Amino acid sequence: MCIRDSADGSYKFNPVKNIADIVIAGVDDIDVFKFEYTDSDGDTASSTVTLNYNEYATPQSPDSMDDIAPRGTADNDYLVGTNQAETLSGGAGDDTLVGLSGADILSGSDGNDILIFDRNDVSIDGGENSDGSLDNDTLVINDINVVANTDMSEVVNFETIDLTNDTAQTLSISLSDVVDITDGNNQLFIKGDSVDTVNVSDMTKAATSDQAGYDLYQDSGNTASLYIQTAIDDNII
């Protein structure tokens, strides 16, 4: 671990390259920072920052998942899994869930959550707000080629798919996929780069769009709306 200070007075704390290397199941792995600021005329202000690694990145054994309490809190959590099969649940707040390589169950629950796509996961659920209010859950995809009806069959309750990573990616998606992936609003936004391609089936590109910067695709019965960022190469197949 190290703490580096910068010329502008800011500090950067680096614990380890892989946070899972320093956590022990059932033990609070905590770093506490106490700091005090003194201005030019002697006035002071102090505070404390506590980092609890065990809460956010404890490895979970697939043999004992049922015995492990949900790891999400009411805050904006950043939960990282391991190479084992495990369950990550964000709870309330705007959470980010990274399951890594295991056959995971990811559940965003309340809030505007970000979940990282892995085709090996058992379930990827953006969640819905318990009070019925609208949310905007984002599924980040880094795979080069994804066919929604086969690779994303376990994906539900998302409003946005994000392909933005400066790498050429291809996503094939149909009307039924949009309905299955989204919540009851059946409205999906796809963000990406100019190197990305989205192939659409069973929907038609509208002459105009009510969302600036997006092309609009709809079906004849207006069952769903698919918005694709104009930078993306979008095609009807």
Image (cartoon, grey):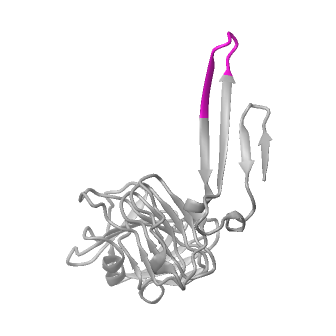
Q: Quadrant of residue 222?
A: bottom left
* Residue lying at 23% horizontally and 59% vertically, measured from the top left: 132
Left/right of residue 131 with respect to residue 162 in the rendered view: left
Left/right of residue 123 with respect to residue 84 in the rendered view: left
Q: Nearer the viewer, residue 79 or 151?
A: 79
Q: Position of residue 112 (x, y in %)?
A: 40, 58
Q: Nearer the viewer, residue 227 or 116?
A: 116
- Give the residues drawn in magenta, as a range: 38-47
Q: Position of residue 225 (x, y in %)?
A: 30, 70
* Residue lying at 61% horizontally and 23% vertically, measured from the top left: 45
* Residue lying at 44% horizontally and 55% vertically, measured from the top left: 94
Q: Nearer the viewer, residue 27 or 32?
A: 27
Residue 195 position (above or below residue 43): below
Left/right of residue 223 with respect to residue 169 in the rendered view: left
Q: How many marks?
A: 0
Image quarter where the C terminus lies is: bottom left
Q: Nearer the viewer, residue 8 or 39?
A: 39
Q: Position of residue 235 (x, y in %)?
A: 45, 78
Q: Position of residue 154 (x, y in %)?
A: 41, 83
Q: Quadrant of residue 204?
A: bottom left
The residue at the far bottom in this view is 150
The residue at the far front in this view is 27
